[in-house]
Image (tube, grey):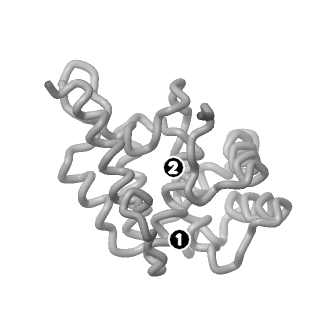
Amino acid sequence: MSDEPFYFRIKEPSVREAVLEWWQQLDKQRGTRAELRRSDTLDAVLLTEGFRNLWQALEQTGQRRDRDMLSWACVAAALAEVREQPTAKDTTFARRLGEQKEKTGKPYMSEMRFAQLQKSRSGDDFLMRLRRALSLINKTAPVLSLADNILHWFQEQQGDQAARPMDRLAVRWATDYFTAVNAYDK
């Protein structure tokens, strides 16, 4: 078994490398992160330099598809919120949400907010809830897990449901979230 996490949507190493490199370069491109963070809608994100840079990087991998443009806009906007990655390689985005806050004994994100995130009705609503979630976890999230989850959410919104329940995003998130909660809630 590999130490490499399983990614549902970002399977190609070249795409993973492009996304990580793009995220690492955000601070070196003056104003790019701020412009993405100020964009309130996915349509606004599409017009940013940061999104264009990511879209061009994806084109070089040969994995870019026009029908995925809004999902990648959401990836760009959400990753612009992330300031650092957790040190543990096996940490997923949902597990991070379920981790215990220092001194309180409660998860970073409440079960109610977690359920609301999962039930987002539109891409803009999903982005807004992702930004809140990232704020709750101090903007520390695994970049590739978050990107993969966003792409997975958009795929399911387009009606492409996984045949196996464990491959559905809601099930994967709930498993990771409640595994983290159960680790300290005894």
Q: Nearer the viewer, residue 53 or 40?
A: 53
Relative vertical location of residue 138 with respect to residue 166 in this rendering, above or below:
above
Identified at 69% across, 44% down, the residue is 20
Q: CA distance from mark 2 to mark 1?
A: 17 Å
* Image marks 2 and 1: residues in contact by CB distance under 8 Å: no
Disc on res. 42: 1
Q: Residues within 10 Å of mark 2 (few under 14, many from 20)?
A: many
Q: Quadrant of residue 165?
A: bottom left
Left or right position of 43 against 55: left
The location of residue 55, given as percent across then percent down, is: 74, 64
Q: Which residue is mark 2?
A: 146
Q: Which mark is residue 3?
A: none
- The x, y position of residue 177, in whole percent, is 31, 42
Task: Tell me where residue 179 appears, x and y as whole percent.
Answer: 30, 36
Which amino acid lies under the numbered mark 1 shown in the image of this protein?
Answer: Leu
What quarter of the picture does the C terminus occupy? top left
| Residue 47 placement, left or right of 117 | right
Compared across the picture, whether 52 is left or right of 62 comes to left
